[in-house]
Image (cartoon, helix red, strand yellow):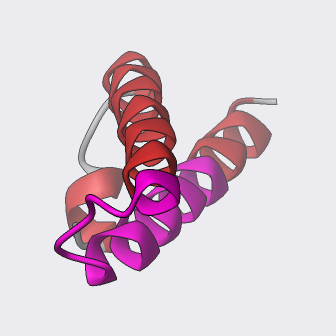
Amino acid sequence: MKAVDVRAKTPDELNEELTNLQKEAFNLRFQTASGQQENTARVRAVRRDIARIKTILGEKSRVEA
């Protein structure tokens, strides 16, 4: 997910996407702990996407204020 794509979304869409990514991160942690995970790079990508969305949500909230 690129920052340009994230900036184009509304805060409601970003919150929904954030929830989905957090659920995915939770599931990936369980897969890692049980040794079932095949794509270890996905953990890093999900964490970065979560951080990217949180950063842009913060920027949007400061602009509104």
Residue 11: quarter of image: top left
Q: Is residue 25 magenta?
A: no
Q: Is residue 32 above or below residue 31?
A: below
Res 16 → quadrant: top left
The quarter of the image holding the N terminus is bottom left
Quick check: 61 left or right of 19?
A: right
Task: Report the quarter where the C terminus lies.
Answer: top right
Q: Residue at x 50, y 38 (%)?
A: 26
Coordinates of residue 12 in the picture (x, y in percent): 40, 16
Residue 43 among magenta residues: yes
Q: Residue furthest bottom?
A: 41
Magenta segment, which residues? 32-56
Residue 17 position within the rendered picture, expressed as x and y whole percent measured from the top left = 33, 32
- Seen at 39% across and 38% down, the residue is 27
Tell me what residue is drawn at x 31 percent, y 79 percent: 40
Q: Position of residue 28 (x, y in %)?
A: 39, 51
Residue 8 is left or right of residue 60, and the answer is: left
Instruction: Find the residue positioned furthest to the front.
Output: 34
Question: What is the chief secondary structure element of the magenta stretch?
Answer: helix
Q: Is residue 45 above or below residue 29?
A: below
Front residue of 47 and 10? 47
**Is 3 situated above or below 49?**
below
Q: Which of these two is toward me, 50 or 54?
A: 50
Q: Nearer the viewer, residue 18 or 46?
A: 46
